Amino acid sequence: MSDGQFRPTGFRILPPVVKNLLIINGLFFLATFACGSAFNIDLADYLGLHYIASENFNVFQFVTYMFMHSTASFTHILFNMFALWMFGNTLENVWGPKRFLTYYMVTGIGAAVIQMVVTYFRVSFVEAQLSSEAISMVYKDGYALLVQGQNWSDPLLGKLNILINSNTVGASGAVFGILLAFGMLFPNALLYIYFAIPIKAKWFVMIYGAIELYSGIANNASDNVAHFAHLGGMIFGFFMIKYWKRN
């Protein structure tokens, strides 16, 4: 990319959009704890992304899900916010706040769209193996079972219930979009895995993307990571950067 297309707008260690995204994510994380302990309200379940046919789905979840993180694992938000700070501040300093925020939101929403499409095909595949009565039972009673920490012992019913009634949370889709952008704009920048092993950004991005693709296709039953959402953020980010480059 030529310097004329993406001019630095002035360097800041913590530019405004990255700073506010870190604050908002932190506040929502604390609010999730507070609502759960004080009011027994699962805020992450309400604002997290549900399957479009679920009774708990709302359109605003395509946006709100990316500001929610699982309180069961502090490393979830820690990794996402560290990556947002590490790569996002460079991109915002190059692009400016408006373009960076646009990119962040589009890749985050794009990740949700890809996750929804993949879930649709997975739901359709499982439903094809069940009777209409069994499917209706899952839609009717499945969410209540998950809230109680239970599920059907039948593997197909249990899998369908998780697909329909569980939620997706986290900024990972947008963060993977940021990682992709960093690799495209600064392909030869050195990153250090575990702060010790040097690798060029372009290879890091490609390897990470390949791992996510393999993990998503493998679809391990014990794996609750939304790998296709991560890939969705990278896909939308790739096409956004190509579009900006042409225009």
Image (cartoon, rainbow, N blue to C red):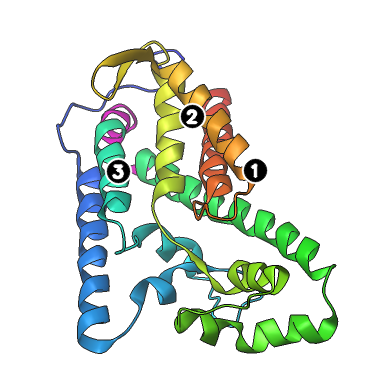
Kindly indicate the quadrant of the structure image that contains residue 213.
top right
The reply to whether residue 207 is in sight is yes
Up-down relation of residue 55 to residue 126 (above or below): below
At 38% from the left and 23% from the top, the residue drawn is 6
Looking at numbered disc 2 in the image, what kind of residue is underneath it?
Tyr
Residue denoted by label 2: 208
Q: Which residue is mark 1?
A: 218
Asked whether 242 or 113 is in front, the reply is: 113
User: In what element is the residue under mark 3?
Assistant: helix
Amino acid of disc 3? Phe
- Please give left or right for residue 1 compared with residue 143 in the image: left
Residue 5 visible from this viewpoint: no
Query: Which residue type carries mark 1?
Result: Ala
Residue behind mark 3 = 79
Does the magenta segment cover residue 69? no
In the image, farthest residue toward the left: 13
Tell me the magenta residue range: 88-98
Question: Residue at the spot x=62%, y=72% of the render?
Answer: 164
Question: Looking at the picture, how far across and down is residue 73, in whole percent?
Answer: 30, 57
| Residue 187 drawn at (x, y percent) | 43, 15
Real-space Cα separation, disc 1 to disc 3, in angstroms: 23 Å
Say how many tags the image has. Answer: 3
What residue is drawn where x is 23% and y is 22%?
195
Please say if 147 is above or below 172: below
Labelled pair 2, 1 in contact (Cβ < 8 Å): no
